[in-house]
Image (cartoon, rainbow, N blue to C red):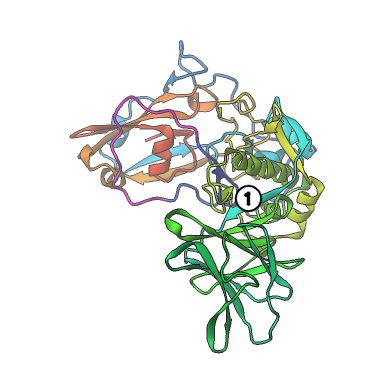
């Protein structure tokens, strides 16, 4: 998962709490809110960050688990209708800040320098290949595409390819499971009289997963709700869990990125930023592929992996960035790095548990065009009480531990909700998630 400027998220490393954390009953709140476009005005100077350790009380450490500098919150929240929270950044803050990449580009940095800044101790190498993307919106138990010239179907059992017939009356093709034959799939076509089975030469059914492809042409996938999405490469009907068919887009990594970068970063941003995003997205995809978490696909098309929109979202600017960085990957010790990124670090990145994802001051993030560098939210007391009924009446909200990095002593690591009946202890990441905040770099101000 990754958090992006357009809408996005990568896996957030969370430290488990020893205390019992109560399960919230609040309806799911969107964790990430679209950041919106940045100002196109040139940057003259970046907003100054407080000096290292600013905001720390005497005797408090500047790394590890520092004690919060927040004063007791009881006087602020016990009789108020809402809690006001100030925050910095948008997303988990690990790795590259996308607003920071744009800020760096406006300072004259090329994409290679941007990548070195956010992923130190790594190298740029060349990697190419195919990627398999689970199209999660296709929840039917078949793969349906519009007919195009020179379409073929490949049988995954032995790799044999069959050319589908070209007939004017054929409108669509689909691959469906064969009842009572779990390892077989049928190829069917739709004409004015309905659906009909097409018998493959030498075999009645596909013996393995079937992949539809038309050389040099995109395929238009028809989803269960009737909408159509266009994809480069092939569309595979893969037998997933429970013998259901999962729709998988199989294509060149280079073509895949053309459907990723424009939904991860505004296409009107500077080319160095778009190129840095292209390399980060390529590296992240290869890292997920190397994990091999799924037999039928390498990654999904949502924020749980990396957002992918297919052919429809491509733009000239982002395609240029993808081509300019063709095959370039961030590597650490010879393997694709876990190039996590988020919309805005708020001025200080967070540690990601590996040498190249270290916490450091981000000198490029807090430029005037970044609307996510600072923000304020109000959360009603009733919202807290609905999320955790065991609280009773909310008495206070207090950050009790921080990571000691940056203003206010850094990001919240632990948060305490005090109630009339019980207290609830949360990690900073969980507090952010449950209450829909932009990041866990927060301060309770009243």
The residue closer to the viewer here, 203 or 314, is: 203
Q: Residues within 10 Å of mark 1 (few under 14, many from 20)?
A: many
Q: Which residue is mark 1?
A: 264
User: Could you say where residue 105 lies in the image, as x and y percent from the top left?
Assistant: 75, 41
User: Could you say where residue 232 lies in the image, as x and y percent from the top left?
Assistant: 69, 62
Label 1: which secondary element: helix
User: Could you say where residue 402 lies in the image, as x and y percent from the top left?
Assistant: 45, 25
As drawn, is 138 to the left or to the right of 319? Answer: left
Picture layout, residue 114 above or below residue 56: below
At a point 49% along the width and 26% down the height, the residue shown is 408
Name the dominant secondary structure of the magenta segment: loop
Q: Is residue 56 visible?
A: yes
The residue closer to the viewer here, 199 or 189, is: 199
Q: Quadrant of the N terminus?
A: top right
Location of residue 446 by image quarter: top left
Picture layout, residue 278 above or below residue 209: above
Location of residue 104 by image quarter: top right
Q: Is residue 42 visible?
A: no
Location of residue 400 by image quarter: top left
Judged from this view, the residue extending furthest toward the top is 59
- Region in magenta: 13-29
Picture layout, residue 417 above or below residue 257: above
At a point 74% along the width and 54% down the height, the residue shown is 318
At a point 63% along the width and 75% down the height, the residue shown is 146
Give yes or no for residue 343 being in the magenta stretch.
no
As drawn, is 59 to the left or to the right of 95? Answer: left
Give yes or no for residue 23 being in the magenta stretch.
yes
Judged from this view, the residue extending furthest toward the bottom is 193
At a point 55% along the width and 81% down the height, the residue shown is 196
As drawn, is 393 to the left or to the right of 231? Answer: left
Total label count? 1
Judged from this view, the residue extending furthest toward the front is 202
């Amino acid at each position: 998962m990754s958090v992006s400027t357009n809408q996005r998220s990568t896996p957030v490393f969370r430290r488990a709490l020893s205390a019992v954390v109560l399960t919230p009953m609040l309806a799911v709140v969107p964790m990430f809110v679209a950041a919106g476009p940045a100002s196109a005005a040139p940057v003259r100077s970046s907003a100054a960050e407080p000096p290292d350790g600013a905001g720390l009380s005497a005797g408090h450490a500047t790394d590890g688990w520092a004690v919060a500098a927040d004063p007791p919150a009881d006087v602020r929240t016990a009789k108020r209708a809402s809690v006001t929270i100030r925050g910095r950044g948008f997303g988990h803050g690990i790795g590259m800040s996308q607003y920071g990449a744009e800020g760096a580009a406006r300072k004259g940095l090329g994409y290679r320098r941007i990548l070195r800044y956010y992923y130190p101790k790594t190298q740029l190498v060349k990697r190419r290949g195919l990627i398999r993307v689970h199209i999660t919106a296709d929840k039917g138990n078949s793969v349906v595409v519009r007919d195009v010239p020179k379409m073929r179907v490949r049988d995954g059992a032995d790799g044999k390819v069959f050319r589908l017939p070209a007939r004017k009356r054929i409108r669509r093709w689909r691959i469906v499971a064969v009842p009572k034959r779990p390892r077989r799939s049928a190829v069917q076509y739709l004409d004015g009289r309905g659906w009909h089975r097409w018998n493959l030469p030498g075999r009645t059914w596909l013996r393995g997963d079937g992949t539809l492809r038309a050389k040099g042409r995109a395929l238009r996938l028809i989803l269960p709700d009737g909408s159509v999405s266009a994809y480069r490469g092939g569309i595979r009907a893969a037998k997933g869990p429970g013998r259901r068919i999962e729709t998988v887009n199989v294509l060149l990594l280079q073509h895949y990125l053309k459907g990723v970068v424009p939904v991860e970063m505004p296409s009107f941003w500077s080319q160095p930023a778009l190129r840095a995003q292209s390399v980060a997205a390529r590296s992240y995809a290869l890292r997920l592929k190397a994990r091999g978490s799924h037999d039928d696909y390498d990654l999904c098309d949502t924020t749980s992996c990396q957002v992918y929109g297919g052919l429809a979202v491509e733009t000239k600017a982002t395609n240029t960035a993808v081509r300019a960085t063709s095959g370039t990957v961030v590597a650490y010790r010879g393997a694709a790095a876990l190039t996590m990124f988020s919309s805005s670090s708020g001025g200080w990145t967070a540690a990601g548990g590996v040498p190249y994802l270290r916490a450091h001051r981000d000198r490029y993030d807090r430029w005037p065009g970044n609307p996510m560098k600072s923000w304020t939210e109000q959360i009603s007391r009733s919202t807290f009480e609905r999320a955790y009924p065991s609280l009773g009446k909310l008495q206070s909200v207090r950050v009790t531990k921080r990571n000691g990095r940056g203003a206010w002593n850094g990001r919240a690591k632990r948060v305490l909700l005090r109630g009339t009946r019980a207290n609830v202890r949360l990690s900073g990441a969980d507090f952010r998630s449950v209450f829909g905040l932009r990041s866990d770099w927060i301060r309770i101000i009243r």
